Amino acid sequence: MQAMVLKKLKTPLEWTTLPDRQPGPGQIRVKVTACGVCRTDLHVVDGELPDPQTPIIPGHEIVGRIDAIGTGVEGLTMGERVGIPWLGHTCGLCPYCRMHRENLCDHPVFTGYTRDGGFATATIADARFAFPLGEAGSDVSLAPLLCAGLIGWRSLAIAGDGKKLGLYGFGAAAHIVAQVAIWQGRSVFAFTRPGDVATQAFARKLGATWAGGSDELPPEQLDAAIIFATVGDLVPLALKAICKGGRVVCAGIHMSDIPSFPYALLWEERQLLSVANLTRQDGIDFLRKAPEMGIVTHTTTYPLKNANQALADLRAGRFDGAAVLVP
Ligand SMILES: [Zn+2]
Ligand SMILES: [Zn+2]
């Protein structure tokens, strides 16, 4: 197998040939056909997540076909198309797992962070954490659903059912969540980097009621806001934009420090929350509904070998929607 491997933090990934791997008990091997690129991959490369491991193959929005099955795997077949998400394994024993909050598991394994991921021609996954994808939709169009879509879906649920929704940072996740929210009958207010008129136009094209810079206040008060950008300065700005009793949800795994702000911004039962990871149930619910919601993912594809370019373009905001690597 070939892979783009992070051998040392903060260095470019290296094209590497590795011995083919065999699935252990309960595992499957998947021939990767597409793997989305996520902001979290940048955090992995930059060493911004706790206890970074190297060498590691990043990538946790994996679409592929099963080409080897370990012992004890049930319900999956050779050649079946599956998706492999960020949550790669949970312990099943800790208090969070037992409370059906496996997204908070004390001993998790994360694809592309603590276990090798999908910037590769093949990957090994725990069969219980793989989602059957059926045959509708292309591999490339489905890949971003596996993190950007899923985390967005969970964030949207946690944001409550307010009608006026702000999205701060209009990248891969927001462009999917916006479509879900509009399908649910909500109005979307999109906030981009100040002056990024191209992304603001992209948001309006997807149906946003309003789009502007993150330094602006929306034309009306919002019921809730989700922050996808990794910028802590946005937290007080989003609190300022929501109504009494509204919610601000931080959806990223990493964020720069939140500056101090007057208590008045939180007062009147405004809530500030974060979203961590996903549960398998989130995946099942979202992927089942995705076709009827008519989500169209906007993707820019790169050959697997050009993963460093895809990461650089993501960092610089050079494309709208999501980047997807194709082996
Ligand atoms: Zn656990
Ligand atoms: Zn991700």
Image (cartoon, rainbow, N blue to C red):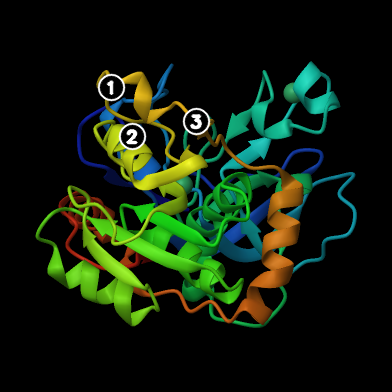
For ligand 1, give the image quadrant. Answer: top right
- According to the image, label 2 marks what residue? 235
Disc 1 versus disc 3: distance between alpha carbons? Answer: 15 Å
As drawn, 303 above or below 26: below
The label on residue 261 is 1
Q: Are marks 1 and 2 in contact (CB under 8 Å)?
A: yes
Q: Residue at x 24, y 60 (%)?
A: 306
User: Which residue position holds label 3?
Assistant: 268
Mark before the other along the chain sequence, 2 or 3: 2
| Residue 90: image location, x then y, percent | 72, 30
Of the residues shown, which amino acid type is indicated by label 1?
A: Phe
Which residue sits furthest left?
A: 195
Q: Is residue 300 visible?
A: no
**Any mark on residue 72, and which?**
none
- Left or right: 104 in relation to 74: left
Whole-angstrom CA distance, mark 1 to mark 2, is: 9 Å
Q: Residues within 10 Å of mark 3 (few under 14, many from 20)?
A: few
Q: Pick whichever, 46 or 244, lies toward us.
A: 244
**Observer-nearest of 257 and 83:** 257
Amino acid on which the number 2 mark rests in the picture: Val
Tag 2 or tag 1, which sits nearer the N-term? 2
**Residue at point 55% right, 47% down?**
155
Which structural element holds mark 3? Answer: loop
Q: Estimate the spatial distance between the alpha carbons at disc 2 and disc 3, rounded to whole Å.
A: 16 Å
- Give the structural element (helix, strand or loop) at label 1: loop
Name the front one of labels 1 and 3: 3
Q: Nearer the viewer, mark 1 or mark 2?
A: 1
**Residue 3 picture location, percent across and down:** 40, 50
Disc 3 marks which amino acid? Glu
Q: Is residue 235 above or below residue 31?
A: above
